[in-house]
Image: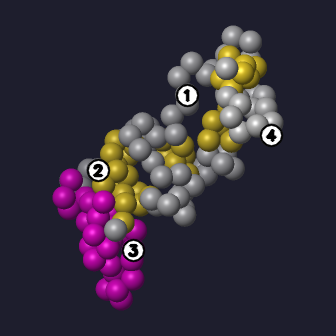
Amino acid sequence: MAHFAELNKSNNNVLRVIVVNNSDILDEHGHESEIVGIAFCKSIYGEDTKWLQCSYNSSFRLNYPGTGYNYNEDYNIFVPPKPEGYHSWTLNMTTGYWEAPVPKPDYANPEDRWAWSESTREWIPY
């Protein structure tokens, strides 16, 4: 099965992700084609819609998107929404994820749990 994300045309926010049968994205040579898949999606949802193929296992465009994700054209990746209230976090364009300005402590005990404090900008054990 192939997956396609519908994007808001003005800001590239992901509106929804749909599943399309592989047979509906085959070109005239029998090869899977994003262009054919986009045409298929537009034939169902309207020519004025915007679609991109995405990967359920994140094998391309870095992340499997969901509603609220954004497509970054410069990097050709889907970016998750910034965590609410985490104003100091920045987007790592290599991983496609938001990161705290200070790395989470990495200790040997896997049962240790940490929470980010935006007010003190540090990881706090809990």
In this rendering, which labeled residue sits more in front, label 1 or label 2? 1
Q: Secondary structure at mark 4?
A: loop
Q: Earlier in the sequence, mark 4 or mark 1?
A: 1
Question: Marks 3/2: CA distance?
Answer: 18 Å
Q: Is residue 27 left or right of residue 42?
A: right
Please identify, in this view, whether the residue under mark 3 or under mark 2 is nearer the observer.
3
Magenta stretch holds residue 20 = yes
**Residue kind at label 1, given as amino acid type:** Pro
Of callouts 4 and 3, which one flags the residue occurring earlier in the amino acid sequence?
Answer: 3
Compared with residue 15, is residue 4 higher up or lower down, i.e. above or below? Answer: below
Q: Earlier in the sequence, mark 3 or mark 1?
A: 3
Instruction: Indicate the quadrant where residue 83 lies.
Output: top right
Which residue in the protein does label 4 denote? 108
Q: Which mark is residue 83?
A: 1
Q: Is residue 7 above or below residue 106?
A: below
Q: Given contact means CB atoms under 8 Å apart, are the residues at marks 1 and 2 in contact?
A: no
| Position in image of residue 18 (x %, y %) | 30, 55
Q: Earlier in the sequence, mark 1 or mark 2?
A: 2
> Which residue sits at x=39%, y=77%?
32
**Which residue has dot 3 on it?**
33
Q: Which region of the structure is painted magenta?
A: 19-45
Residue 58 vertical placement versus 35 (above, below) = above
Q: In which quarter of the view is residue 30 placed?
A: bottom left
Q: Secondary structure at mark 1?
A: loop
For disc 2, the marked residue is: 49
Q: Residues within 10 Å of mark 2 (few under 14, many from 20)?
A: some
Amino acid type assigned to the residue bearing label 4 in the image: Ala
